[in-house]
Image (cartoon, coloured by chain):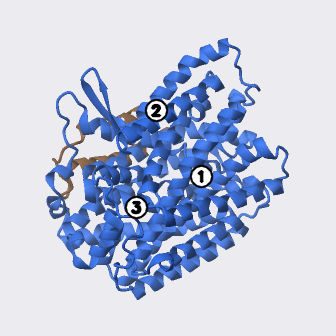
C-alpha cells in the first residue's frame, strides 16, 4: 500500500505544479518533490522492517 | 541518471532539451577548439590531476581487494558477488547518477526549466521496483549463477533467441551511454582551460581513457566499486558546498527563483483536449524508472550485492542520491541568477559545449581554484565509474549470451573471463572513437533511442521475474514490434522523447518508451495463446523453480 502511494503521487503533476507556498524562497513544485523523496525513503524503510524478522 | 539521462535516468532529459528546444543546434564537439582561448587554471588542474592519479592507483590496487580468482567471470565481472550494503550503495549510486547526469540535469534546468525536475520523481519510483522486482531477480540469479539478464531469460524461457534479443538490445543501448560519459570528461577538461587543435586537443581525453581501460581490464568490477566511494565523497562535498555557498552569494533562494523566467519555473498547464506537459512529465518519469534497471550496468550493480537484504536496504538508502540530484538540478537556476552565461570569459565555453557548460562555468565563477579542482575531479571520476561498469556489463553480456551460446559452447573459466576482458576493451574503444569522430549530437540521439529500445526487454526480464506464462516466441514478437514502433515514432518526432498520441480528438503527449512498451506487452499477451496453440513451446523447460525467487 505504501509503495502504491509512493509510486502514484509523483505520477500526478497537477498535485504539485504550483509555486505557493514557498519554503525559504523555494517554490512548492521543487521542495514538495524533494520532500517526497524523504517520505518515500521512510516508506521503504517501514516496509523493510515490517517484512524482516 | 540518467535520464538517467537519463537516463535514462536523468540523462534522457538532456536530449529532450538539446534536441527539442534547441532545434538540434548543438555545436559539434570539436568545432571551435581553436577559438576556445581560456587561460589554463593551474591550481585547479594540479588538484584535478592529483586526484586522478590517486584513483588510478586505487583502481589497480582494487584487484587485491576481497581477493578472488579474476580468471572466473563472476569474480571479474561481478566482484565475486561479495559487496555488502554500503559498497552496493556506492556502486549502484555511481551507476544511476553519472557525471553526465550531473552536467545534463542542471543544463536542462538552465535551458528548459521545471521539466528537468522529472529526474526527482523518476528516481523516487525506481526504489519500490528495486525492492520488489530486483530482489527476486537477485535471488534467482544467485541460485543459478546467472550473470546477465540474458542468462536469466535463457533459463526462464528456454529460448536462446529471446536471450539474444535481450542481449543485443542491452549492448546497443549501453554503447552511446558510455560515449556520453566521455562527453562529461571532455567538458571539464575544456573548462580547466586545457585545449588544443585537432587530435592534440584530445590527448587529455585519451589519457583518461587509457587509465580507465587498463584498470577495468586488470581489476574488473572491483575497480569502479572502490573508486565509486572516493567519487561520491567528492561529489557530496561539492554539491553541499555549492548549495550552501552559492545561494548566500546570490542573496537567497527567493532571489534566485525570482530571476528564473516565469514560464520556466513551473510546468505549463495543459490546454483544452490535451494532457499537455503533465502527461509528458509523468510518463517521462515512469518510463525512465522502468527502463533504468533494465540497463545491463544497473543489473550488474544489483547482482554484485552479497545478499537480497543488502538490496532491500539499498532501496531505502539510495534516495540519498536523489536528494542530491534534486539540489544539483537547482544549479541550473543558480546559473540563470548568477548570469554566468552572459559573462565574456565563459562565452567560448558555452559556444563549444552549449548548456552543458553551465555547471562548470558556475563552479569556476563561484569558487576558488583549489575547490574547482576538487569539483571537476568529482565530475571526471564520476564519468569513469559508470563507464567502467557499463563496459563490464556489455562484456558480460557478449561473453555469456553470444560467445558462449553461439561460438564456443564449452569455454574454460579462464577463456571466458579473457573474452570478457577483451570485449570490455573493445566496447570502450568503440565509445572513444564515436566521441572523437562523430558529433556529440548523434551520441545523444542514439542514447535517446537506447532508452526506447531497452524498455522493450521489460516483459521478458521484469515480468519474467514473476511469471512464465508468456511464450518465448510471443515475447520476441512483442519486442520486435516495440523496437520498430519506438524507432519509427522517435524519428517521426524528430528524435525527441515525447510523442503526441491522439485518441478521439484528445492528445496525450507522453514518453515514447511508455507507449511502445504497452504495445509490446499487448502483442506478447495476444500471441502467447496463439503460439502455444501452434506448438511453438520453448525448446527447454523453465530451469528455475518458484522457491528460487525468494530467500
CB atoms of marks 1 and 3 within 8 Å: no
Decide if residue B154 is on the left or right side of residue B443: right
Characterize the local packing of mark 2: few (<14), some (14-19) or many (20 or more) Cα atoms within 10 angstroms.
many
- Between residue A3 and residue B299, name the one nearer to us: B299
Where's the C terminus of chain B, which quadrant?
top right
Q: Secondary structure at mark 2?
A: helix
Residue B392 percent across, percent down from the top left:
64, 56
- Taking the image as shown, residue B62 lies to the left or right of residue A50, namely right
Please determine whether, in this image, residue B288 is positioned above or below residue B23: above
Q: Return the chain for callout 2.
A: B
* Colour used to depict chain A in the structure image: brown
Both marks 2 and 1 on one chain: yes
Q: Are marks 2 and 3 on the same chain?
A: yes
Direction top: furthest residue: B533
Q: Is residue A13 visible?
A: no
Residue B371 occupies which quadrant of the picture? Answer: bottom left
Q: Nearer the viewer, mark 2 or mark 1?
A: 2
Where in the figure is residue B51, as x and y percent of width and height? 52, 78
Which residue is label 1 attached to?
B301
x and y percent of residue B548 in the render?
70, 33
**Image point (76%, 25%), residue name:** B539
Which residue lies under the disc numbered 3? Answer: B102
> To which residue does mark 2 refer?
B485
Point 37% across, 59% down: residue: B104
**Where residue A20 sits in the image (x, y, percent)?**
15, 47
Q: Are marks 2 and 3 in contact (CB under 8 Å)?
A: no
User: What residue is rendered at 53% in x and 69% in y?
Assistant: B230
Amino acid at each position: 500500500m505504501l509503495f502504491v502511494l509512493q509510486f502514484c503521487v509523483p505520477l500526478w503533476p497537477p498535485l504539485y505544479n504550483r509555486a505557493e507556498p514557498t519554503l525559504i524562497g523555494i517554490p512548492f513544485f521543487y521542495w514538495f518533490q524533494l520532500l517526497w523523496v524523504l517520505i518515500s525513503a521512510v516508506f521503504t524503510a517501514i516496509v523493510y522492517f515490517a517484512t524482516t524478522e | 541518471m540518467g535520464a538517467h539521462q537519463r537516463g535514462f535516468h536523468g540523462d534522457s532529459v538532456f536530449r529532450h532539451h538539446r534536441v527539442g528546444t534547441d532545434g538540434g543546434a548543438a555545436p559539434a564537439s570539436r568545432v571551435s577548439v581553436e577559438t576556445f582561448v581560456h587561460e589554463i587554471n593551474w591550481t585547479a588542474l594540479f588538484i584535478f590531476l592529483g586526484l586522478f592519479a590517486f584513483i588510478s592507483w586505487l583502481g589497480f590496487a582494487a584487484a587485491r581487494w576481497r581477493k578472488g580468482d579474476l580468471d572466473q567471470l563472476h569474480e571479474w565481472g561481478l566482484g565475486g558477488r561479495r559487496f555488502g550494503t554500503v559498497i552496493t550503495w556506492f556502486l549502484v549510486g555511481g551507476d544511476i547518477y553519472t557525471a553526465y547526469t550531473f552536467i545534463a540535469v542542471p543544463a536542462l534546468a538552465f535551458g528548459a526549466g521545471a521539466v528537468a525536475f522529472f529526474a526527482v520523481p523518476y528516481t523516487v519510483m525506481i526504489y519500490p521496483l528495486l525492492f520488489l522486482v530486483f530482489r527476486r531477480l537477485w535471488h534467482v540469479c544467485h541460485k543459478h549463477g546467472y550473470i546477465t539478464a540474458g542468462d536469466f531469460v535463457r533459463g526462464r524461457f528456454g529460448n536462446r533467441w529471446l536471450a539474444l534479443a535481450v542481449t543485443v538490445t542491452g549492448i546497443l543501448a549501453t554503447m552511446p551511454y558510455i560515449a556520453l560519459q566521455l562527453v562529461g570528461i571532455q567538458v571539464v577538461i575544456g573548462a580547466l582551460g586545457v585545449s588544443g587543435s585537432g587530435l592534440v586537443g584530445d590527448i587529455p581525453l585519451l589519457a583518461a581513457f587509457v587509465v580507465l581501460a587498463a584498470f577495468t581490464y586488470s581489476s574488473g568490477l572491483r575497480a569502479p566499486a572502490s573508486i565509486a566511494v572516493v567519487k561520491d565523497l567528492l561529489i557530496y562535498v561539492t554539491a553541499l558546498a555549492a548549495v550552501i555557498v552559492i545561494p548566500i552569494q546570490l542573496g537567497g533562494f527567493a532571489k534566485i527563483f525570482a530571476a528564473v523566467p516565469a514560464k520556466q519555473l513551473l510546468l505549463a498547464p495543459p490546454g483544452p483536449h490535451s494532457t499537455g506537459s503533465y502527461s509528458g512529465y509523468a510518463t517521462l518519469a515512469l518510463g525512465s524508472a522502468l527502463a533504468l534497471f533494465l540497463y545491463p550496468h544497473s543489473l550488474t550493480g544489483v547482482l554484485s550485492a552479497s545478499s537480497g537484504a543488502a538490496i532491500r536496504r539499498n532501496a531505502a538508502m539510495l534516495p540519498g542520491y536523489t536528494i542530491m540530484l534534486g539540489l544539483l538540478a537547482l544549479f541550473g537556476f543558480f546559473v540563470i541568477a548568477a548570469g554566468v552565461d552572459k559573462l565574456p570569459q565563459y562565452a567560448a565555453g558555452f559556444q563549444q559545449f552549449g548548456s552543458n557548460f553551465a555547471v562548470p562555468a558556475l563552479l569556476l565563477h563561484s569558487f576558488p581554484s583549489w575547490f574547482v579542482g576538487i569539483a571537476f575531479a568529482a565530475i571526471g571520476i564520476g564519468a569513469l565509474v559508470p563507464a567502467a561498469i557499463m563496459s563490464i556489463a556489455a562484456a558480460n553480456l557478449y561473453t555469456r549470451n553470444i560467445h558462449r551460446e553461439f561460438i564456443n559452447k564449452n569455454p574454460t573459466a579462464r577463456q571466458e573471463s579473457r573474452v570478457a576482458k577483451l570485449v570490455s576493451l573493445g566496447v570502450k574503444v568503440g565509445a572513444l572513437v564515436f566521441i572523437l569522430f562523430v558529433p556529440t549530437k548523434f551520441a545523444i540521439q542514439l542514447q535517446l533511442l537506447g532508452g526506447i529500445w531497452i524498455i522493450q526487454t521489460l516483459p521478458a526480464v521484469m515480468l519474467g521475474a514473476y511469471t512464465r506464462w508468456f511464450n518465448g516466441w510471443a515475447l520476441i514478437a512483442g519486442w520486435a514490434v516495440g523496437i520498430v514502433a519506438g524507432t519509427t515514432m522517435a524519428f517521426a518526432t524528430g528524435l525527441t522523447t515525447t510523442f503526441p498520441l491522439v485518441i478521439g480528438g484528445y492528445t496525450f503527449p507522453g514518453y515514447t518508451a511508455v507507449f511502445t512498451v504497452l504495445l509490446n506487452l499487448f502483442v506478447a499477451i495476444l500471441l502467447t495463446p496463439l503460439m502455444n496453440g501452434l506448438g511453438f513451446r520453448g525448446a527447454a523447460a523453465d530451469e528455475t523453480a518458484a522457491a528460487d525467487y525468494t530467500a
